[in-house]
Amino acid sequence: MDNGHEELVALHRYGVISAAASERLSPAERGLLVRAIAGRVHVTADGEERTYSRQTIDRWIVAYRRDGLAGLRPIARSDRGRGRVNPELMAEAVRLRRAVPTRSAAQIAEIIWRAHGVQLSERTLRGHLARSGVSRRELVAEPARAFGRFEASRRNEIWIGDVLVGPFVPHPRRAGSKRAKLFVLVDDHSRLVVGARWMEEENTRAGQDVLRSAICRRGVPEHLYLDNGSCFRAVQLARTCAVLGVDLVHSKPYAPQGRGKQERLNRYIRERFLAEAEARGVGSFEQLNDDFSAWIEQVANTRTHAETRERPIARFIAGGPPQLPEPALVREAFRWSVTRRVTKTATVSLLANRYAVDPLLVGRTVELRFDPEDLTRIDVCLAGEVIGEAVPFVIGRHVHPAVPQAMRPEPTPSSPGIDYLSLVRAADDEEKGAGRISYAEVQFPGFGEVSR
């Protein structure tokens, strides 16, 4: 099993236990969560459906608390007691499932092991039951569910994220325009917009850029609730959450329940901000983001919310300043990871760049961890441990192509009437500029006035 597959297995296991791994839970609360997790069907990176026993989930939680993500990597072992699968045992498995439709494949395998001394593969058994038309999904009808109102009990308990498609913006580097995409994160308890930015591309790094900014300013959320967009399903985001200890949750496809608050915020942004921005005209991404940042701070986060009857910023800071993570932890969380096989010349490649590594690694598969914004510094890992640094040999690209690039400012077209967004920006600039020193007006003894 190579490092890449081990990393995917570890991320999948963290996704299973993340809700129950929080230090805030009492033993009783954790027990309830573990029982609920054990009763679910989990989809692996290969698209296979798996169930796990409570003992397995408890063992993974202990391993994660002890060693972090590295503790969830699979350990090579020799399976003993496995017998040759035969039709009689498979027929008995079908009978066991029909007798009690809620029995999991793991439970059926356990019954057969104790009755016949033969240990069946859960994966093989699950596939056979599905082909025989006795999967739990087919036999057990899911009861109708009622969805009530929900609100997080404290700040940073749940952050909700989404991507809002906005107007066309003139492209900063070539002729034509580009559709703007707004990555936005909202704290469920306070309704505070903790992070938001308009991006050219809807990719993983753009979303990570907004998430990193929000975490550095507002703290680390316990749960991150996102939709099923490809930018939110990437393994890089799963690794970020695993390193930070964040429970990453995706909404079910075609099940909009739970995203009503985000949809209302999107409508509010369209009606109150985009309508004004499009009426005046959007000249550049830089202008759009500057206007939006000022509008968020001066309007969206300071208005009295219709449901909470409080201002989002006041509700968020009611408990005092949030606890911010260590910079070293944030740096590690937002690094990317890929696997490469070391060539006979003791080099590895990444995006056409070549790096020299320890000659002892020739022929082995290693993990490369790097910051997409700086491809000149790459750590080499083996079995989850950093064992050295890759030395740049041939560098043609210093930044990953998925990293959002700085936009060159464009002239802003004028428009008649009252420029609402400019007024908001002026108020924001005045508030941020209060108490600033103008060094151009400072005079030092013997030097006269500083040249402007």
Image: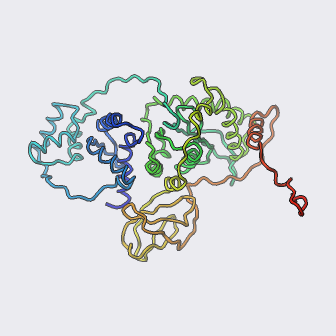
Residue 89, image x and y in percent?
A: 11, 43
Residue at 52 percent across and 56 percent down: it is 328
In this view of the protein, which residue sits in the foreground, 299 or 221?
221
**Quadrant of the snapshot with the N terminus:** bottom left
Q: Is residue 133 visible?
A: no
Residue at 59 percent across and 31 percent down: it is 315
Q: Is residue 201 left or right of residue 298?
A: left
**Quadrant of the snapshot with the C terminus:** bottom right
Compared to 60, does 250 lie above or below?
above
Compared to 210, does 138 lie above or below?
above
Residue at 90 percent across and 58 percent down: it is 449
The colour mode here is rainbow
Q: Is residue 290 left or right of residue 78?
A: right
Q: Is residue 422 left or right of residue 128?
A: right
Residue at 61 percent across and 46 percent down: it is 199
Choose top left, top right, bottom left or bottom right for residue 380: bottom left
In this view of the protein, which residue sits in the foreground, 340 or 261?
261
Residue 122, image x and y in percent?
A: 22, 45
Figure label count: 0
Residue 361, image x and y in percent?
A: 39, 72
Residue 143, image x and y in percent?
A: 32, 24
Q: Is residue 312 visible?
A: yes
Choose top left, top right, bottom left or bottom right for residue 110: top left
